[in-house]
Image (spheres, grey):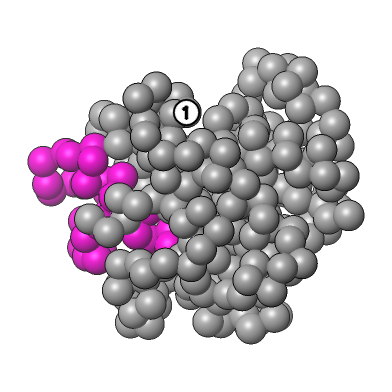
Amino acid sequence: MARVFITGSSDGLGLMAGQLLSREGHEVVAHVRNESRAAVTKSALPQASAVVVGDLSTLAGMREVAKVANTTGRFDAVIHNAAVGSAEGHRVTPDNLSHVFAINVLAPYVLTALIELPERLVYMSSGMHRGGRAGLEDLQWEHRRWSGSQAYSDSKLFVAALGAAVARHRGDVCSNAVDPGWVATKMGGPSAPDDLEMGYVTQAWLAVSADPEAQVSGRFFFHKHAVQSHPSMHDECFQEALLSACAALSGLELFATGRD
């Protein structure tokens, strides 16, 4: 049995992955944004051993989620599922960060830095990452005209590169990115054409499976198959620049002494 922490598991793919893992006998710790979502999640996922509450749009909330998650015990896997989509307007967080960047990129970075490192990490990306821009000069969209689609695509490239950077720095960890497909969730919309089941099965499989195909690192997966990603995902210079940018924004070094 594995212990798995899933961010953003109040609904959608995160909840479905949690339900699947629970049915398979694994221990799931869920995460939700606020107390009202916690009540709904406890009903939808009653097998969860704990529900961590915290807003991943703020640095204080990210730190609190990591702190509370660590108090529940060490995890065998963490699935970084929480995200906002391409329809987001240009919102700025209390930390003066783009809302999309804060949740989709900086939160996984901060949680990776602060949660005791598990054996497996799964970062939820998107097929739209292939349209991402591998540029870091205006991460918070202060100087460009806002495009929700581009901001989302960029964020999903960044989080895929984060997963690859962890894989490169930590050979003792299986760290991978996943494209769940365009599936019929609240974010994807009811007409989304891809296989919904494979969207959540793949992340759960990477988190716990004994299959040799799941015990790899630094890959980009779609429906349980490693596929080609945006080339910048594996660009070491880009990875290091992204890590430096996230460190400057969060005040946390991901690979500080004792973690690298």
Residue 99 appears anywhere in the view = no
Tell me if residue 176 comes above or below residue 83 in the rendering.
below
Say what amino acid the circle numbered 1 marks. Answer: Thr
Q: Position of residue 28 (x, y in %)?
A: 79, 42
Q: Position of residue 234 (x, y in %)?
A: 38, 77
Tell me which corner region of the image, top left, top right, bottom left or bottom right, holds residue 130: bottom left
Magenta-drawn stretch contains 140: yes
Which range of residues does the magenta coloring cover?
Answer: 132-160
The C terminus sits in image quarter: bottom right
Question: For the point 42% across and 67% down, which residue is it?
Answer: 227
Magenta-drawn stretch contains 152: yes
Between 22 and 163, the residue placed more toward the observer is: 22
Question: For the point 79% across and 57% down, which residue is it?
Answer: 75
In the image: residue 113, left or right of residue 38: left
Query: Could you say whether the residue bearing mark 1 is in a helix, strand or loop?
Result: loop
Tell me which corner region of the image, top left, top right, bottom left or bottom right, holds residue 133: bottom left
In the image: residue 237, left or right of residue 114: left
Between 76 and 24, the residue placed more toward the observer is: 24
